[in-house]
C-alpha cells in the first residue's frame, strides 16, 4: 500500500518565539507515522519579527519543509488558501496554526478518519485554557448569531484546524473565486463526508494572541456576510415593527386629542420617533454598505494573495 501524501499547511505571523519549538513537535509527530509521505508548508504573512529568517534556516536543513513568504499582510484566511492551492497534489491537507494551541498529536487521529473515508475532518474546541470569559462569550455569541441567520449551520467552537481530502481542496481552489472567504463556513457548505474531533486548546507557548477584538469583529463580519443575506432583510422586519409602533402611537394620539384638549403639543414624541427612525435607517444603510463593499472588492478581481518568495532545500 502506497503512503498517504499529506501536506500540513501552517499560517505564520510573528511567531519567532515559538516557531522552532512548534516545528520540532510537529516533525516529531509526523515522523512517527510511517504511512505518511508528508510535507510542511509554512505560509508567512509578512511578519515584522525574524520569523522568516528562522523558517529559512529550518527549510535549509529539513527537506520536508516549504516556506511561502507572502508579499504583504493578506490575513489568516488567505494564508490558508495559499497553502491549500500549493497542496492540491497531496492526497490530504491539514490546516493548523503554528502557535501550539492546535496539538500536533491529534494528526494521527485526523488521518485515521481520512483513511476510513472522511473528506473533511474538522476539530471542535472543548475548551481553551488561556482564554478569558469575555472572549469565550464573544465566540459563543458569534456562532449563535451566525447559526441563527445562516442557511448553513456552523459547528460551534470549530477551529481552522482540520483535514480536507484532495477533492475538497481541488473543489475549493477551482470553484470558489470569491475573495471574502470564511473557510469554516465554506467547508460546511460544500458537504461531503465530515467527521468532528474534539480537543482542548493549550495555552499559547509564547506571546499574545494575534487576534485583537477588532480583528475578531472583522472575521465575524466576514463570516456573516459570506454565509447569509439575511441581514439585508432586517430593514423589512424593523420597518414593519416600527410601523406597528407608529400606528399604535397614532391611534393613541387621536384618542387623546378628543379626550383631553389640554395636552401639550407632541414635540417630545415627534423628536423621539424621528431619532428612532433615523437610527433604524442608518443601521440598515450600514448593513447594505457592508454588502456593497463586499461586491466592490469582488469585482476588482485583484489577486487574493501574492507570493514574494518560495523557500525550500531544493532551491
Image (cartoon, rainbow, N blue to C red):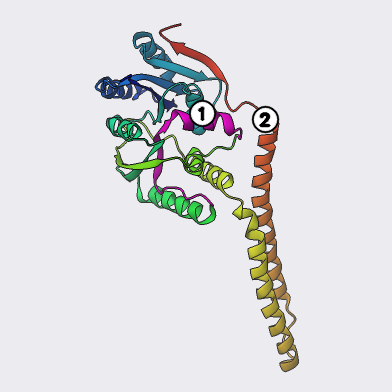
Q: Earlier in the sequence, mark 2 or mark 1?
A: 1
**Screen quadrant of the N terminus:** top left
Give the answer, above or below, for where 138 lies relative to 14.
below
Residue sitting nearer the eye, 294 or 261? 294
Q: CA distance from mark 2 to mark 1?
A: 20 Å
Query: Is 253 rendered above or below residue 79?
Result: below
Task: Give the mark toward the camera: 2 or 1.
Answer: 1
- Residue 138 image position (x, y, % from top left): 44, 50
Queried whether the magenta region covers residue 271, the answer comes back as no
Is residue 170 among what the camera can see?
yes
Query: Where is residue 194 drawn, in percent x and y?
Result: 40, 41
**Is residue 152 toward the left or the right of residue 279 in the image?**
left
Q: 5 or 117: which is nearer to us?
A: 117
What residue would you read off at disc 2? 301
- Reading the image, the residue beneath label 1 is 170
Q: Position of residue 57 (x, y in %)?
A: 38, 11
Q: Residue at x 69, y 44 (%)?
A: 292
Tell me the SS state at disc 1: helix
Q: Count numbered badges in the picture.
A: 2
Name the side, left or right, on which 297 lies relative to 123: right
Dot 2 and dot 1 residues touching (CB under 8 Å): no
Q: Is residue 78 visible?
A: no
Residue range of the region highlighted in magenta in the rendering: 151-178
- Extreme-left residue of the structure: 32
Of residues 166 and 187, which is closer to you in this image? 166
x, y (%) of residue 143?
45, 51
- Crowding near the residue tagged with mark 2, few <14, some 14–19, many ≥20 C-alpha atoms within 10 Å: few
Residue drawn at point x = 70 percent, y = 31 percent:
300
Vertically, is 135 above or below 176? below
Amino acid at each position: 500500500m502506497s503512503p498517504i501524501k499529506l501536506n500540513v499547511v501552517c499560517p505564520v505571523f510573528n511567531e519567532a518565539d515559538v516557531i522552532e519549538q512548534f516545528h520540532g513537535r510537529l516533525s516529531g509527530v509526523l515522523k512517527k507515522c510511517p504511512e505518511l509521505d508528508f510535507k510542511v508548508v509554512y505560509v508567512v504573512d509578512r511578519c515584522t519579527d525574524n520569523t522568516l529568517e528562522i523558517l529559512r534556516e529550518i527549510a535549509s536543513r529539513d527537506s520536508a519543509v516549504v516556506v511561502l513568504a507572502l508579499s504583504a499582510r493578506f490575513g489568516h484566511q488567505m494564508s490558508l488558501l495559499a497553502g491549500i492551492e500549493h497542496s492540491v497534489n497531496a492526497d490530504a491537507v491539514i490546516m493548523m496554526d503554528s502557535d501550539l494551541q492546535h496539538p500536533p498529536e491529534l494528526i494521527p487521529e485526523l488521518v485515521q478518519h481520512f483513511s476510513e473515508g472522511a473528506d473533511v475532518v474538522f476539530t471542535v474546541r472543548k475548551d481553551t485554557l488561556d482564554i478569558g470569559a469575555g472572549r469565550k462569550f464573544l465566540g459563543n455569541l458569534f456562532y449563535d448569531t451566525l447559526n441563527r441567520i445562516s442557511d448553513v449551520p456552523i459547528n460551534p467552537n470549530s477551529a481552522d484546524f482540520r483535514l480536507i481530502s484532495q477533492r475538497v481542496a481541488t473543489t475549493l481552489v477551482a470553484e470558489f473565486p470569491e475573495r471574502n472567504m470564511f473557510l469554516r463556513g465554506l467547508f460546511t457548505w460544500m458537504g461531503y463526508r465530515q467527521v468532528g474531533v474534539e480537543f482542548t486548546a493549550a495555552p499559547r507557548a509564547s506571546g499574545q494572541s494575534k487576534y485583537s477584538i477588532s480583528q475578531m469583529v472583522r472575521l465575524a463580519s466576514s463570516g456573516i456576510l459570506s454565509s447569509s443575506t439575511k441581514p439585508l432583510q432586517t430593514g423589512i422586519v424593523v420597518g414593519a415593527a416600527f410601523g406597528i409602533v407608529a400606528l399604535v402611537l397614532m391611534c393613541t394620539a387621536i384618542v387623546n386629542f378628543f379626550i383631553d384638549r389640554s395636552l401639550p403639543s407632541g414635540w417630545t414624541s415627534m423628536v423621539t420617533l424621528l431619532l428612532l427612525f433615523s437610527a433604524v435607517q442608518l443601521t440598515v444603510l450600514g448593513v447594505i454598505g457592508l454588502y456593497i463593499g463586499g461586491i466592490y472588492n469582488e469585482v476588482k478581481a485583484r489577486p487574493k494573495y501574492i507570493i514574494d518568495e518560495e523557500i525550500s532545500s531544493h532551491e
